[in-house]
Image (cartoon, rainbow, N blue to C red):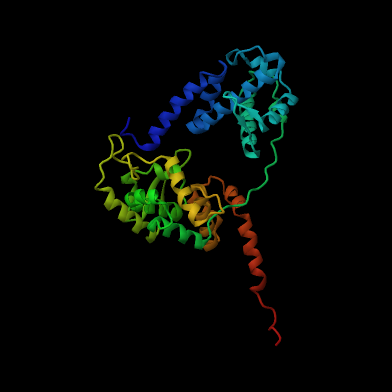
Amino acid sequence: MNQLPYHEQKDRENIRKLRSMIQELPPFCPEFFRGIEPQTSSRTRIAYAYDMKIFFDFLRKENPAMAELDRKDITLSHLDQLTVTDLEEYMEYLKYRFNEKNQEVVNKERGIMRKISSLKSFYNYYYRREMIKNNPAALVSLPKLHEKEIIRLEADEVVSLLDEVEKGESLTEKQKQYHKRTRVRDLALMTLLLGTGIRVSECVGLDLNDVDLKTGGIHIHRKGGKEVTVYFGMEVEYALSDYLEQRKEMIPVEGHENALFLSLQMKRMSVRSVENLVKKFARIAAPLKKITPHKLRSTYGTSLYQETGDIYLVADVLGHTDVNTTKKHYAALDDARRRSAKDKVQLRETKG
């Protein structure tokens, strides 16, 4: 299994995790997950399983008719008897609840919307197959989302970030010790993220044979399984070339021989380790901004749109399946471009 491509390894891990999660749900649930498998990724199905577990726990805690039931004892008949009011109470419950470890959990707008969307898909599946007569979820309105401001790095902050990654002058003494060993790798990784806009999961999933310096491209696996080639410029090429020379001297742990980016333990870097890396340097370059790998992706998308004005190109390069997603994120830039046009056309010579 260890010789499988990274995305296939992760998919197998996800499927094993999903099977374990489904076993904790009511007996009628496996049919739903089998039904949606052709249209969804394993990660999406895990999210559905997590969301439905929360819903069934809500019913056992808050619904008197199911208070004495074990989660496995809940049936489709119980779901058929629920009303819109029950589901609206669930939405209210999601705002503030305690999990199984009695830890406080607060869901914001997007978290609530995802869980209600999961519930709608769940109900729709059984309703369309005439396994239940009522579909109260269809009558529940999704919470209104307030658009969030795009957080990204400005041009000078990008320069500051990469300078810090390269030199490490503002790091602590302990951090500088690690920096000596990881500087070339870190610079290649950060330059790649900022120069291509790829997702952090796509970055850590790269294998050595996914990089083609001759054509200036990397072969990546997008969400949903789509395979594409993303191209990069000279700055990324130089940083990758330096790292690939160093990478030849590394001896990876068995099962990680093909990984492009290796940790100090000589294993494929994890998403969490890249997140921590970005956080460490971003604190120095942009201390007032909460910068994550996804914000580096936004930085690239913003720069590409400002340079080209082509929203369809930005959507394609970022891997958005719907250009409306891209438009929503960069609408403010559209407005700024329109405002900048106001003084471009001069009707008469300015007097004096």
Judge whether 310 appears above or below 182 on screen. Answer: below
Furthest-bottom residue in this view: 352
Furthest-front residue in this view: 173
Residue 45, position in %: x, y?
52, 29
Q: Quadrant of residue 111?
A: top right
Q: Quadrant of residue 10?
A: top left
Residue shown at the point (47%, 51%) measured from the top left: 197
Considering depth in this image, is 234 or 41 the residue closer to the camera? 234
Left or right: 50 as drawn, with respect to 10:
right
Judge whether 215 appears above or below 344 on screen. Answer: above
Furthest-right residue in this view: 85
Judge whether 161 appears above or below 344 on screen. Answer: above
Picture quarter with the C terminus: bottom right
Residue shown at the point (38%, 33%) measured from the top left: 9
Considering depth in this image, is 151 or 350 the residue closer to the camera? 151
Residue 115, position in %: x, y?
62, 32
Residue 47, position in %: x, y?
54, 31
Does residue 247 appear in the picture of this structure? yes
Considering depth in this image, is 335 or 285 the residue closer to the camera? 285
Picture quarter with the N terminus: top left
Left or right: 46 as drawn, with respect to 229:
right
Residue shown at the point (69%, 37%) measured from the top left: 143
Does residue 213 appear in the picture of this structure? no
